[in-house]
Image (spheres, helix red, strand yellow):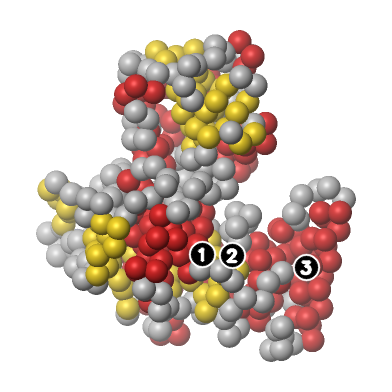
Amino acid sequence: MTPSLSPRARVGRWAVLGVNWLSRLSGRGAGTVVGGRVGLAICPDLLAQLAKGRLVILVSGTNGKTTTSAMTAAGWGSGVTSNDTGANMVPGHVAALARSNHQRVVLEVDEAWLADVVRSTTPSVVILLNLSRDQLDRASEVRQLADRWRECFSAPQHEHVVVAANANDPMVVFAASGARHVRWCDVPTPWLGDAASCPRCTRPLRRDDATWSCTCGFAVPTTITTRLAEELEVAGERVELALSMPGAFNEANAALAVTALREVGVAPSDAMPRINALVGVAGRFTLRRWGNHHFRLGLAKNPAGFAAILSTVEADDGDVWIAINANTADGRDPSWLFDVPFESLRGHVVYCFGDRRLDLATRLDYAGVDFRVVDDPSDVPVASAPVPLLANYTAFSEWLKESSPC
Ligand SMILES: [Zn+2]
């Protein structure tokens, strides 16, 4: 039960549950956001009241939030509340906390909302994954976000918060170094395209292999977690890293999840096997079937995300399918396609799907990649092996809905 709720918050909570029940009943989806909004209209501090007395871990960053949240929840064991529908702003958090009374909470948080959610939920740990450009027409500039995060963690009322942070992303380091307690993690971070200059003094950052520094003294901090070849070392303890999901970016996500869980008393040797066993999150990385076609579905929404997921395409994969939309949830401006290193797909034939398939085809043409523009998906030849299908947000949702698991 939730005995600490004020009478107004109790009404708000019942409103959230009622509206979402009606939404499901009328076939309009889970209704998490609409229910949360109604609850917040009744009781503006509903999130703070619902979070009171619970042990909260927040997960934020441009890429990997949903997967890392799922890893953190899985690594914690059973009885964890999470906004696993992907609704990662305050109404989604309210809906998740209203429907479950578990003490242990993992919330995925949109980068722009992080400071507000830290204030409301007084988390024990915050995981900071990475910061890069995303949805240029909606989100703030990367540096503005880093400034807001830094200000949040520097505030005296948040000095108890432990931050588990990616030590290899200069923007994250700048933001997290405002916090009193930071557990820095040395994790794969190939994309530094949004951190050319020092966030502290604006001079160009010097790069040397996997490290970076600035003449002002801003540099990679000392880490407690390191990914070795097939192991993770957390504060001197080594555990086997054998994820069921592909890509170095998922190893980075897992390292941050395990580091955060250690701060709430979960031993890496307990958390890591549960995370290793996790197969796919919300359709990502799973094998799907559509008609006679089989594909491995991957989500990428911005240059950094695409750079990461392109690294999972194998040389012998043959055909590659890519689907690009530019709806509101994707960002209306698809010019970011020109910052994606599609050159790595030379030697493959890329089938271009989605509302913005012509923008994609133009970019592939500049990259020297062989492509086919798909106006009618039923014309696409069936490949002998599952093809990688890489899609941005709404295109991913469409393909997930249209296909079935293998
Ligand atoms: Zn500097």
- Residue 124 image position (x, y, % from top left): 45, 78
Vertical arrangement, residue 81 with respect to residue 280, above or below: below
Where is mark 2, residue-wise? 82
Mark 3 or mark 1: whose residue is earlier in sequence: 3
- Residue 79 image position (x, y, % from top left): 59, 71
Number of the front mark, 3 or 2: 2
As drawn, the label of residue 193 is none
- Residue that appears at 78% across and 81% down: 10
Vertical arrangement, residue 54 with respect to residue 210, above or below: below
Q: CA distance from mark 2 to mark 1?
A: 7 Å
- Residue that appears at 39% across and 69% down: 270
Disc 1 marks a residue whose amino acid type is Ala
Are there few (<14), some (14-19), or many (20+) residues within 10 Å of tag 1? many
- Residue 354 image position (x, y, % from top left): 59, 25
Where is mark 1, residue-wise? 73
Q: Is residue 256 left or right of residue 71?
A: left
Mark 2 element type:
strand
Q: CA distance from mark 3 to mark 2?
A: 16 Å
Image quarter in which the N terminus is found: bottom right
Mark 3 element type:
helix
Tag 2–tag 1 contact (CB < 8 Å): yes
The residue closer to the viewer here, 228 or 171, is 228
Where is mark 3, residue-wise? 16
